[in-house]
Amino acid sequence: MTVIDLTTDVGKVRLLIGDRDVSNLFFSDAEISAYLGMSGSSVKRAAADALDTMASDQAFVLKQVSLLDISTNGPSVAAALREHADRLRKEADAADAGDGDLFDFAELNVNAFQGREIIVNKWLRGAA
């Protein structure tokens, strides 16, 4: 029995999207690697993109069909997959934002007065 290698980014994406049945994989390793490449190596963003693809496939292929006692609802499945993708993107955004590390400021030193002001401001902020 072959198992998914969860130490690799491809394996982590598979874990997040539920593509773990090695006898019937939804995506090839090359496809998941492409998602990772397009997402800047972000596992959660790659998983979200893969889920969006799965959702589109479900909505396109399954549609909503009822035959005898059997029914499928592709749009409902697609909506659930897209909701999961949105949650993963929000988690990735929160991880990227950290504790506000994305915001910083820069002061330009174009004359002697501004140079002194920069030094005073750094001292007031407790910076070296």
Image (spheres, rainbow, N blue to C red):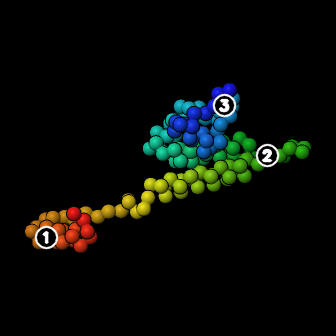
Look at the numbered disc 3 and give the secondary structure of its residue: loop
Q: Nearer the viewer, residue 99 or 92?
A: 99
Q: Percent position (x, y) of residue 126?
A: 26, 68
In the rendered view, tell whether residue 59 sits above or below residue 118. Answer: above
The residue shown at (52%, 36%) is: 8
The residue type indicated by label 1 comes to Arg
Binning the other alpha carbons within 10 Å of mark 3 as few (below 14), some (14 to 19) or many (20 upward) gives: few
Q: Which numbered tag is attached to residue 116?
A: 1
Q: Residue 31 at what x, y percent from top left?
A: 55, 34
Is residue 114 placed above or below 54 in the rendered structure? below
Mark found first going from the N terminus, 1 or 3 = 3
Which residue corresponds to the image point at 9% horizontal and 68% vertical from the top-left? 112
* Residue bearing mark 2: 72
User: Which residue corresponds to mark 3?
Assistant: 22
Q: Is residue 22 above or below residue 50?
A: above
Please state the total of marks drawn on the protein image.
3
Q: Which mark is residue 99?
A: none
Q: Quick check: 67 left or right of 34?
A: right
